[in-house]
Image: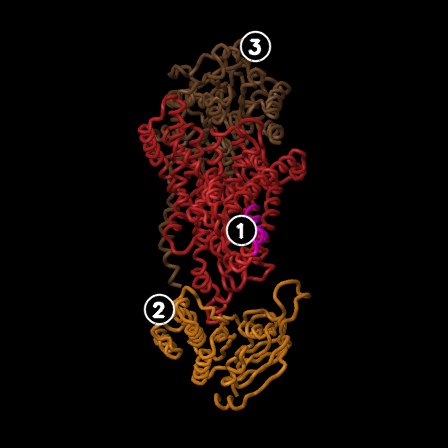
Chain colours: A orange, B red, C brown
Amino acid sequence: MPPAAIQIQDLTVHAPNGPTKSRPKILGPISLNLEPAEHVLLVGPSGSGKSTLLRAIAGLNQPTSGTITLQGDLATDGPKQLIKPERRKLGYLFQDGALWPHKTVHKTLEFVLSAAKTPKPQRLDKIAEILELVELTGKEERLPSELSGGEAQRLNLARALITNPKIVMFDEPLGPLDAPLRAALLERIRFLQQKQGWCALHVTHDPAGAMGIATRTLHIDSGQIVRDEQHSSNSQATA
Amino acid sequence: MSGSITWADVVSLFEARNVALLGRTIGLGLGAASLALVFGLPFGFLVARTNMPGAGLIRPMGAIPLFLPSLFIAIAWAPLVELRGGLAAALVLGFSTFPLVALFSARAFERIDAAKEEAALLAGGLRSVLRMELPLVLPSALAGASIAFAFAVNDFATPDYVSSVGPKFNVYADEIFASWNVTSNPGRALITALPLIALTLLTLVPALALRRKGNLATQGSAFRAPGPLDLGALRIPALIFALVPLSVGALVPIGRLFLEAGGLPAQMDAGGGVDIGAAWATLQDSFALALERAREDLANSILFSVCAALVAVPIGLIIGHAIERTSRRFGRMLELLGLLPLALPAILFGIAAVFFWSTPTTADIYDSGAMAVLLFAGRYISFPILLLAGATASLDRRLEESAAIVGAGPIRRLLSIVTPELRGSLAGSFVLVFVFCMRELDSAILVPAANHTAILRVFNGVHFGRDEYVAALALLLIFAILLPGALWTLFAKKRLEVLR
Amino acid sequence: MSLIFPRPFRVLTPLVLGLLASCGADADVVIYCALDQVHAEPLLERFEKETGLVVRAEFDVEANKTIGLVNRLRAESSATRCDVFWNNEVAHTVALAEEGVLASYDSPAAADIPDIFRDEERRWTGFAARARVFIVNTDLVTPEEIGQITSMWDLFDPKWTEKGVGMARPLTGTTLTHMTALYSVLGEERAREYVETAKRLNEEGKLSLTSGNATLMKQVREGELAFGWTDTDDYNVAREAGKPVACIYPDQGEGGIGTLLIPNSVALLKDAPHEEAAMQLIDFILAEQTERELAFARSAQIPVRKSVERPGYVLTDFDPMAVDFRVVGGDLPKRQEELKELFLD
């Protein structure tokens, strides 16, 4: 049996900065297993710890205690970062993009491939392939500021997926889009996940809209997982 | 040369004489900082936020007084006014440092949310706008004034020069210089300097805190930049007000230098009428002579300053970035360390350069221009550190995080994500380091390699009474100082970000 | 990455090369020179032309007069990189000799220089002197009145302090040497009285303390002050510019202590890296021809050899102060500290 995509054990995170004792707890302790090819929605009120969990998995914050294991490798052990964010091989879609304003579509993807040490000759093909998948072909020379909202999110998606990660985090990337656009993008995400087979952890304020692609929904409140729902129909569809 | 420090040296710090010197120096600093505040705050408001005529042009020109050696301002005004002593020193240093307050204030005024301002405008017009905005801008303005204070208390050439007539106005920096002269003992110079260093740090640390507070107070997520406010009938009085510090700190000194380079004061002294033709010829001769005599020195100044900036800016980027992106405690420590060079009296840099580098193994470096570059870069490293820390703070952290997640390591992130995003601030830091190195005198005095610069030639020249040639040389130097900033302002698409 | 890196490197490389080439270390002889750059440079150029040797000269900075180079020599004494020190005064040179920074060299060119200007151990030799004089503004002081200014104490006369008098703050340069010399000539008490009176009058706004002799000269020249202490070279700059100035050699005649003469001094550094060329340069500097040139130059230095030709405005016929420079040099650090405490408050 392949290892779990993400395995979390007794993870707690406290607010950064300030005297250690007075730092409020913002997450945990939580334990969690995510299997390959799952699409897990993470829902809950603002400030409930959804993004904190994602950032902890990506290695972008410092947990107080607990462990995070990614595909069988121990990545975080309490405050110790055993694997740096740049070595975790994740895809991550940030809220409203966090696209690099000075890089064109092509340069953004080229940068990702060069950071991932993809050999140069393969890069052009890979870029062409992913741009086709996210329907951005022909917009290679545009800067993020020259893209529409939907296009920017598709670039965000391309950036996260071009290196074929096994785990992809969605930190509410579709929030600012209107409903039809969101639906179209979700359909695109479902298509890509089926094709590439990654495990997704997906923060959203609109669980109803995303329900179509979810295999499971985690309800989180005050830093705790309060409900864990399986959606069997979808899990068969993606499996 | 021994670096030993005796207990007696420490005790002597508390002598009545030293305490009095320190008190007077603080008075001078407060005077200069208050003046800088009184002119800088309204100036910043007028150029950044109103429809004052010529605001766009006057704004960049407002930086010039800071870029001129303060002694140039003193020398230009001495023949024109009777005023001497402490008040004169405070005035010169206040006008010389007012751009600090103006820059900080202008930026703070720009960060005020248009929605807030419109609400205030509807409630009670311009007066109500100012009442709402002043508390928001004041922390930034005070931060600028604190740096002005730090500049003023470390200057000794200007107080000395302006109290050449009448009762002498001694300052604490004199004491450091004199202590070193008497004993050649770097340890004692350092001990003597401690009160001044402590004083400067005590001012700068709150200044940073104030500035941070100012930034937070005026930054909202749905921020909309405010438009220019209509001054109505006050447009012309406002222009006149803005021109006062600009004239005192830049236009009059530069104008006076032109007159001197043309030999006009000498003509008038001789009693004859003013002969413009002769003045024009003298002007040309003066510049020709200055270029011939000082070409090498001018080239050295530019070379050293450019290299110092090229050394200081990347280091400043690394440290400045680290201040914002590491843990808060470590960041604050780094920040304090980054401030230290700004708080050290210039003369200590010269002393330290001699003490540490004038050894048999480092003699080649000590003799070469690299020594001057190291000296200058070290002296002004605080500027890029603080500027780039500020710029990093306002850079969306997730741009770097998203690069980390796709596999870019820290160096690649710094080079490919942070550097291009901060290019305006990087250029601003570069220009600032360049400018201050070009006008650096106090630390350069002791170091042989740094002696071959244009500013040192100007100060040597002042001694010989060859006013025309020295004035022309000073103008050439000013031109070289202002050139990079002017070019960038005119041609670059990105604004020169001295403050973010 | 390729976006940003190579371009700065392309700019950087020539810069760094230029930097290392600047301030060339390939000189045949290195001189630290406290004489004003404009006066010394032509002489050194002539030396280069005559000998084919390359001279690297470090000049002093006005803000740091004399003491900058002296301190630098002290600092560098563990790894001397200077060969020859040309000081524009002598007290600090003596102090350096006492500290063991200088080497003995009995230059043949100095054979006819009077003994009072030479160190017994030949660690330094004096030449081309300046005198400490009063520069007077003749618009403010009439020709008849000028005759009344004869003594150094006249500086404190209420008659003149009303019109404005001054001196450089005696913490550096020749003014420091001058005040230190007064201690050995007048005795502790009278000398102390002199400096304390100056300080008191400054506090009362009746006597100006300038940042240097040149500033003092400028202020008298412009009529801001009626008269004050300066050096003959500074006086000569004002005279040449056609300004209304006159020069008084005080304390002449019977009972007077005489006018202080401060010679330039030249010395070989201990462990000088280029000893042979250094001796050649010292011989050149001490030659009669140099004293002559300095007498005719703008600095109007007074030759210490009676035989050297000089222009009419360079006075020879006056009573010099009888002062032992070895004593003054030895006394200097102590007096400097005292004067600092008196004048810096």
Residue under the image location 57 percent in, 58 percent down: B216
Residue C79 x %, y %: 49, 40
Q: Amino acid at mark 3?
A: Gly
Is A200 colored magenta in this rendering? Answer: no
Instruction: Give the residue type at disc 2.
Output: Glu
Q: Nearer the viewer, mark 2 or mark 1?
A: 1
Q: Are marks 2 and 3 on the same chain?
A: no
Asked whether residue C163 appears in the rendered view, the answer is yes
Residue where numbered disc 1 is placed: B126
Rate crowding at label 1 as few (under 14), some (14 to 19) or many (20 or more) other CA atoms within 10 Å: some
Q: Secondary structure at mark 2?
A: loop
Mark 2 vs mark 3: in front: 2
What is the C-alpha distance between the residues marked 2 and 1? 46 Å
What SS does tag 3 mark?
A: loop
- The answer to whether the residues at label 3 and label 1 have Cβ atoms under 8 Å apart is no
Q: Quadrant of residue C326?
A: top right
The percent coordinates of residue B189 (x first, y second) are 58, 39
Q: Chain of mark 3?
A: C
Q: Is C316 placed above or below A132 here? A: above
* Looking at the image, residue A56 lies above or below residue B447: below
- Looking at the picture, how far across and down is residue B113, in whole percent? 52, 59
The magenta segment is B123-145
Instruction: Give the residue type at disc 1.
Output: Leu
The answer as to whether the residues below labels 3 and 1 share one chain is no
**Extreme residue toward the top, this view:** C254
Q: Nearer the viewer, mark 3 or mark 1?
A: 1
Indicate the position of residue C62 as horizontal and vertical percent values.
47, 32
Question: Label 3 vs label 1: CA separation?
Answer: 78 Å
Residue position marked by numbered label 3 in the rendering: C255
Q: Helix, strand, or loop for circle 1?
A: helix
User: Dot 2 corresponds to which residue?
Assistant: A141
Q: Is residue B420 left or right of residue B344?
A: left
